Image: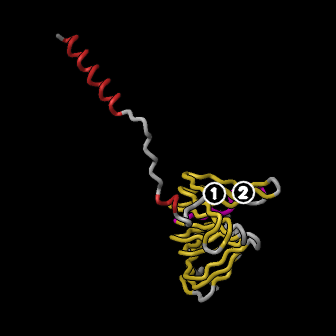
Amino acid sequence: MLSHLKYFGFVLLSWGLLSSCGDSPKPMPILEEELSADAPSEVFDSIYMLFTEEARTRMKLFAIRLHRYDEKFGHKNVTEMLDSLNFYVYDEKGNVDAILTAGYGVIFDDEERIEFKQHVVYKNLYQKHRLDTEYLIWNQKTKKIHVPDSVKVRVTEERNIINGMGMDADEDFARYKIRKVSGIIAVKNQEE
């Protein structure tokens, strides 16, 4: 009796498989994103990029998602970094000099410019300065960073907090100029 049930089960399974096979394949559904003219030409997940100059590591990038576009925002060869990113800047000796984190970034290859948005944090590891803002522009040609809006700079060792509206700095954040300054500055007591 058990062998008849096995045989009957095998016949049912075979019939189900054979009846589901057809002679005309169904077309694959096309994703709506593929039809759009605004769709990225390349999409990457969990990306790691290394930027070098004269055989020396200049920067490393880790991004959760990266979209490359042939043209976007009126520029050619645009790269969007989505869902969190980390940038590491290296000094002449190959040591990490500064770290930048943000929720979003866009690279404009034609202008050698990167824009970062969404809780941008930029730290200089040697001077122990930290910059917090929502929008930062990094010009790779001039090796300068620019913050057009609200900015907060913390100097860790001195416990100073400087707020401002606008800032210009070197890319390693070693020197900077803040506009419309306010903040808390620690003053040492000096005995006369």
Q: Residue 93 location in percent, x, y?
A: 77, 56
Residue sitting nearer the eye, 171 or 64: 64
| Residue position marked by numbered label 1 in the rendering | 61
What is the chief secondary structure element of the magenta stretch? strand
Tell me which residue sits at (55%, 70%) in the image: 120
Q: Residue 116 location in percent, x, y?
A: 59, 70
Tell me which residue sits at (57%, 53%) in the image: 44
Q: Is residue 62 above or below residue 182?
A: above
> Quadrant location of residue 177?
bottom right
**In this view of the protein, can residue 190 be seen by the observer?**
no
Highlighted magenta segment, given as a residue range? 93-103
> Quadrant location of residue 73?
bottom right
Residue 101 belongs to magenta span:
yes
Tell me which residue sits at (62%, 63%) in the image: 69
Q: Is the residue marked by circle 1 packed among few (<14), some (14-19), or many (20+) residues within 10 Å?
A: some
Q: Is residue 142 above or below residue 82?
A: below
Residue type at mark 1 is: Leu
| Residue position marked by numbered label 2 in the rendering | 51
